[in-house]
Image (cartoon, rainbow, N blue to C red):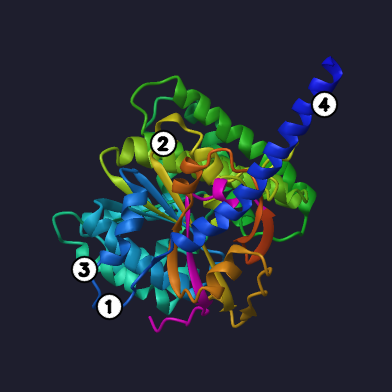
Amino acid sequence: MHYISIRKIALFLIIVCSNNLAYSQKDFKDYVINNITPLDLSDDADFNSFDNLGNAIGDSKIVMLGEQDHGDGSTFLVKAKLIKYLHEKKGFDVLAFESDFYSLNKAWSLVTAGQISLDSAILTSIYPVWTNCQQCDKVFKYVKTELNNKNPLILTGFDNQLVFKNVFKNLKTDIIGYLDTSDISFINSNYYKNNFSTDVDSLLKIFRFNKENKNSKIKFLNFFNDTLSTILFQLDSIKNYNMCYYKVIKNLISFSTELKYIYEGNQLMSDSIRDKQMAENLLWLAKYKYPEKKIIVWAANSHIIKNRFPDFNAKNKTSYSMGNIFTGFKEFSEKTYIIGFTGYSGSYGRATTEKVYKIPSPKSKSIEAWLHENNNSTCFIDFKKFTSLHPQFGEPFWMNGSNWQSYKSNWERAFDGIIYIDEILPCVKSKN
């Protein structure tokens, strides 16, 4: 009797679980189809079509806007309208680009001091994949329009990578100038007096990646990382150090470490180092530089995603994304809303190259296929609302995660929402 009861209970549980699983699969697709928010991108349209998106964002302090590739021209047009909405209707006053932390923060300070033009700051501090793309022109023109208003749209950067040649000279001068005024013992060493400046030059040259003399470069990077770590250790022991330049030195360490792993052939670890530093930079911007302001983040899907791996339960993960790390910070875990971008068809191509690539056809049972079949052009889907209604949902589904690669995964846990664009057009080179 006891054995039969256990069998009946087990059978009952299997049936219940199977029914729940089937319901969950159907429920998610039904939710997507029945909760589409079309977005009106026309220049003369008001922001009414963005109300549902605004409600989904709620009182978030950070909103991250992704892109499959840095050549998704159509995505940039959507971002332009969305940024305007977030600034004017939701009180977001900072636009943080996936661009150099040091140069863009310094450039903005020079703009506000009247020492350089905004155009100069943009062209010398934001990566050319965006500044050379015509579809991004609306964003930069809007920033320029808002510059002298009561609440300008502030530009900042959170990437650790150094791209612009003119940055190198300024960075060296600024770091040495800062250290010379510090009270750390390192500046009294013979090495600092005789070799440090030359080694900074060597470090900046190595940042222009090539595989020649790989082993000697790895050796130098290890040595100079130790040197920079010594500087940070000594700065930690004194009070009133300049936190911004402290962060700049940390960015140098992370970038050189990132480069070392590339030389060693470990791309996953290199990606993790970069994303970790980007998350820490964004944390500093949100907590210390702009503690009273809301921040819009402009970056790739692969950086803002809450987990870089298609299998969210995979063991032995060795690479983590900025979004994953940043939402792990307690003070921002519930104050961040992450929007991924995807599309059904078209092509993409960066403004820095002549190459244009066709977007691979989505899987027949993908979220892109569901939205395309329902004749959607550009629309928003709130995943966060769904997960709050169905916290036990765990069925993977097909979607383009990043780089126009489709994976079957729990994407409702990777992004808080998505913006779908039916046809993607590549970047058109800007005339500036």
Q: Is residue 231 above or below residue 247?
A: above
Residue 79, quarter of the rendered image:
bottom left
Q: Earlier in the sequence, mark 1 or mark 4?
A: 4
Q: Earlier in the sequence, mark 4 or mark 3?
A: 4
User: Which residue is identified by label 4?
Assistant: 7
User: Which residue is identified by label 1?
Assistant: 43
Disc 3 element:
helix
Which residue of the protein is positioned furthest toward the front in this rendering? Answer: 1
**Residue at horizontal 34%, vertical 43%?**
61
**Residue at horizontal 60%, vertical 45%?**
307
Q: Which residues are magenta?
A: 409-432
Residue 6, quarter of the rendered image:
top right
Depth check: 248 or 413 in front?
413
User: Which residue is identified by label 2?
Assistant: 332
Q: Nearer the viewer, mark 4 or mark 3?
A: 4
Q: Amino acid at mark 3?
A: Thr
Position in image of residue 203 (x %, y %): 60, 49
Inter-mark Cα distance, 4 to 2: 47 Å
User: Which residue is identified by label 3?
Assistant: 145
